[in-house]
Amino acid sequence: VAFALMLLRVLVLQSTGKEESIKSCLTWIESQLSTTGNETPLASHVPRSMAWLTLANAASLSWWAVPGTLVELALVDWTRDSQPRPEVRQAAAAFCYNKVLLEGAMEDDELSDDRVSLLCASLESIGGEADPTTRLRRLLVASRILVPMQAKNRVVVAAKTLILDLGFLEVIQGLQSHPGTPTRNVDDAQRCKALALDVQGLLEG
């Protein structure tokens, strides 16, 4: 299954959105991720992480409308309490980041329900995430909701207010001194600390 998903991941990027077979495969992945227990071929960490990476590629393309159920499933799989494997957490976070990145800024600086969920979930318990890559990607999700790519460094006031009201500023400050895992993904650990400092500046500005 993992090898098939590796191939599908490439085919998705080459797709025009007109291939029904590609869409059917994405729907199959969604259904399998929704299946609990060992009854799904995506139960083990290798195919499950590859499934999320395939969906991450699809989420970067304008022709695919990301189902809301997948966002909910990703929020489960990027949390250390419910997903012990860092590879899966990294891949689920990559999916969420690509989704936020493609959507860009919303009209009138509003936050959709999906974005509120992603923003809160990205910062909730992020201090307990030992994997630097997952920690960085989750912070990237929050930062792109706060300042969308197309917003030219303009802060979304609704996102800033929500972060401050929920007390996440202290969480972001804590990331700047997060010990992490010294032998794992040192570059991502440093990038996360630098990004946390930048986000703090935006929140306090």
Image: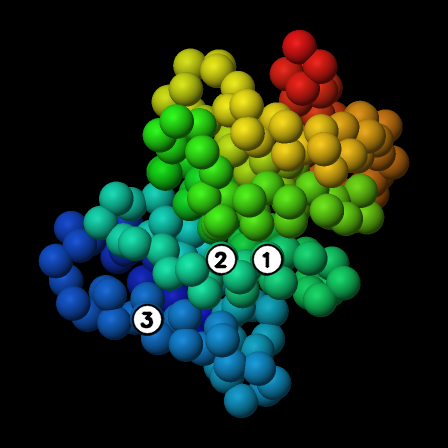
Give the class, few, some or many, for how many residues have Cα within 10 Å of label 1's Cα (few <14, many ≥20): some
Tags 1 and 2 in contact by the CB under 8 Å rule?
Answer: yes
User: Residue at label 3?
Assistant: 27
**Residue displayed at 36% across by 38% down:** 102
| Residue indicated by mark 1 | 75
The answer, for residue 198, to whether it is visible in the render is: no
Residue 143 - label: none
- Using the numbered discs, state the Cα–Cα distance from disc 1 to disc 3 in whole angstroms: 18 Å
Kindly report which numbered mark, 1 or 3, lies closer to the viewer in this rendering. 1
Q: Which amino acid does label 1 sit on?
A: Leu
- 191 above or below 121? above
- Mark 2 residue element: helix
Using the rendered image of the protein, determine whether residue 37 is visible from the camera's viewpoint: yes
Q: Distance between the residues labelled 3 and 2?
A: 14 Å
Question: Which of label 3 and label 2 is nearer to you?
Answer: 2
Look at 57% across and 31% down and name the residue there.
159
On the image, the x and y values in percent for residue 202 come to 64, 16
In the image, taking residue 145 as reference, residue 87 lies left or right, namely: right
Going by the numbered disc 3, the residue's amino acid type is Thr
What amino acid does circle 2 point to? Val
Q: Name the residue under label 2.
A: 71
